[in-house]
Structures are given as structure tokens and as C-alpha cells.
Amino acid sequence: MKYLVILVAMFTTTACSMNDIVELDKPTKQNFDLTDMDSDGVITARERCAGTILGASIDNYGCGKVIDINHSEELNILFANNSDVIEPQYYDEVEKIAKLMKKYPNTNVVIEGHCSVRGSYELNLALSQKRAKAVTKLLETSFDIDANRMSAVGYSFDRPIDTSGTPEAEERNRRVIASVTGENTMSEMKWNIYTVDDLEE
């Protein structure tokens, strides 16, 4: 038994010495850049949007989500008959659109002017255009919205929302609509233990 143990030990030692040992003279070449330059969790080899804000919510390629904005809102502005003057008590209505456009700087707005059926079509077409233009002018002068981001169009009485013919219907049809469109490219931040829910005022 003693000799058997010695023979097994010798065989094992000999077998180990027969194995080839490979030594690397230089480090293995890495074909892909595995660094994460902007610390967003996506390696450089996969990165398509470098410079991500730290903590932003991203896809598998390091890009933030882009959300289309398509917001249409009727502004509660009452115009006097045959007038395009916006009274100061309605400035808050215009300010709502200004705040939205400032929050999303890649948006534009189309202001639509609409009239009731009183008077000729041509007169109302010009009046509805003036009312829409009055809103864009107020956005520019009082709320610092770039004029290049706005356009005004008048529809005369082509698009009534109330065709009952009552005085109340005419008042409803004299309206202004703001259609804000564009993209929200602001970085949406990932939730973490320090996140505090936003509270609307």
C-alpha cells in the first residue's frame, strides 16, 4: 500500500509537469471601449448620447426620453364687440401659455382667432386675425416669448363651436385657441431615496 501511494504521487506530479503553461507577454487587446465617460451606466462602445446629466433616466444607449408635446387650450378671453383689445384681467390666461413655452423651450405656438357670425365674412376674418395677433404680441412684449416661436391665424366664423344663434352662442364663438406643439427634451430624472415628489402650487 505504501508503494502504491508513492506511485500515485509520482504519476500526479509528472502529469502536472506535462501541462503547457502560457505566459502573456502583453495584455489582451480590448476591441470595445468599456469605459463609462459620463457615468450613466452605459459603456462608451454602446453610447449614442454622450454627456448625459448624472441621474437622468435613459434608454439602453444612454439617451434620454423625448416626449412629443401637443397641447391645445382655449384661452378664456372675452373681446368687446368688433375689438381686438385684450383687457388686463385676461393676462393670466395668456401667462399660462407663456409658462408652458418657457418650461419647454423647443415648442412653438399657433394662436387661432375665431369670431361670431355678426358682420361680413371679410370683416370677421380680419378681426379674428387681429385678435390672434394681439395674443402673440402680448406673449412677446409682456412675457418675453420669442416672436419666431409664434404664429397667428384668423378663421373668421368658419369654425363655430355653438351654432344655436343665441347671444350666448355668439359670445362662445368669439374665442382664441392656443395650440402648443414641439418636443420635451428635458432630462427626466430617475427616482432615488432622496427624491421629493413635486407639489403643484
Image (tube, grey):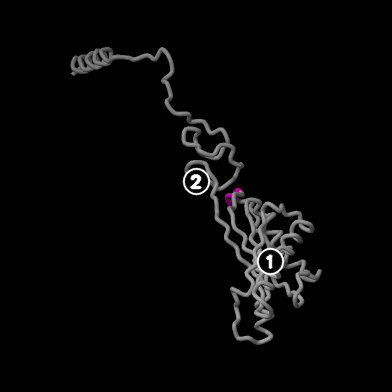
Q: Position of residue 12 (x, y in %)?
A: 24, 17
Nearer to the camera, 154 or 180: 154
The residue shown at (65%, 77%) is 173
The residues tagged by marks 2 and 1 sit, at their Cα atoms, a distance apart of 44 Å
Q: Position of residue 141 (x, y in %)?
A: 79, 57
Which kind of residue does numbered mark 1 sit on?
Answer: Gln
Seen in the picture, residue 128 relative to 19 is either above or below; the reply is below
Q: Main secondary structure of the magenta part?
A: loop
| Element type at mark 1 | helix
Q: Position of residue 149 (x, y in %)?
A: 66, 53
Q: Quadrant of the N terminus?
A: top left
Q: Let me know if residue 49 is in the magenta part.
A: no
Which dot marks residue 72? none
Which kind of residue does numbered mark 2 sit on?
Answer: Asp
**Residue 136 left/right relative to 13:** right
> Mark 1 sits on what residue?
129
Give the magenta-colored segment's residue range. Answer: 187-191
Seen in the picture, residue 89 relative to 39 is either above or below; the reply is below
Local packing at callout 2 (Cα closer than 10 Å; few below 14, some 14-19, many 20+) is: few
Seen in the picture, residue 20 relative to 137 is either above or below; the reply is above
The residue shown at (58%, 40%) is 52
Mark 2, mark 1: which one is toward the viewer? 1
Nearer to the camera, 83 or 2: 83
Q: Position of residue 104 (x, y in %)?
A: 65, 53
**Residue 201 left/right relative to 158:** right
| Element type at mark 2 | loop
Q: Quadrant of residue 4?
A: top left
Which dot marks residue 59? 2
**Residue 36 left/right relative to 139:** left
